Image: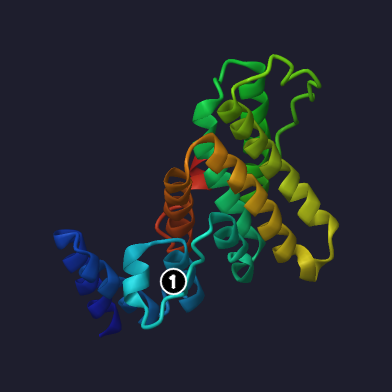
Amino acid sequence: MSDARLREAERRWRESGALADEAAWLRERARAGALTDEALRLAAYVGHAAAAAALASPPLAPAYVQAWIYGLQPWGVEACQRAAIAAARRALVRVPPGTRRGRYARSALARVERLVTGLPPLPPLPWDPHVLDDDPSPRERAAFEAACAVGETVHEVARVAQDARAFEASARAGGAVIRAVEATDEPTVRAAVRDEVAAWALGERDPVLSRVL
């Protein structure tokens, strides 16, 4: 009976595309044990409208973007790191891929993505101390620094005690996201974080894994 209800709820949503039907399908997934309450709350927290509608009391998200990222701490290290990756990835449009900056930033981010998904990291590109000497625009510099900050996040988190890692990850991710906002704008970064983190939390797809495979 439960499986039949779940299939029917999904069918209705796929046919209508309506937010209310998607919320009903998410509730059925939760009732059937196919979706945890914490995953649903995480998706709602980052701005997934149907996940919020599926909950009787959705979590409140701070208005200030850095505080919003800090608020990911209860969901653990990976949620924080994925938010930072999503923001930095979106900001990288400001860094031309054929330049030294572009190659280094993308290499640093790709290494982090492999680590987050449990794959062996690629060898790092050698650091060029003159990579910013030609004085890039403020937006390009911020995007480059966002990508580098995400790379530093993984290593810094590994250095602290286990029970402090989520706090460290949220703080580091907050810094990377602020740089990404400076490179693009806040609505763009929030949408990137929402789309990637919610898709992963709800088990719809893994945007990070799809990029590294």
Percent position (x, y) of residue 65?
53, 55
- Horizontally, residue 185 falls left or right of residue 98, namely left
Q: Which quadrant of the rendered structure holds the N terminus?
A: bottom left
Quadrant in which residue 151 is drawn: top right
SS under mark 1 = helix
Q: How many residues crowd around disc 1 within 10 Å: few (fewer than 14), some, or many (20 or more)?
A: many
Q: Nearer the viewer, residue 158 or 174?
A: 174
Residue at position x 40%, y 81% from top?
A: 57
Is residue 213 visible from the viewing direction of this image? no
Q: Which residue bears the numbered disc 1? A: 40
Residue at position x 68%, y 47% from top?
A: 115
- Horizontally, residue 172 falls left or right of residue 6, namely right
Percent position (x, y) of residue 41?
46, 72
Percent position (x, y) of residue 205?
43, 53
Looking at numbered disc 1 in the image, what kind of residue is underneath it? Leu
The vertical placement of 44 against 126, above or below, is below
Is residue 149 visible from the viewing direction of this image? yes
Q: Nearer the viewer, residue 187 or 195?
A: 187
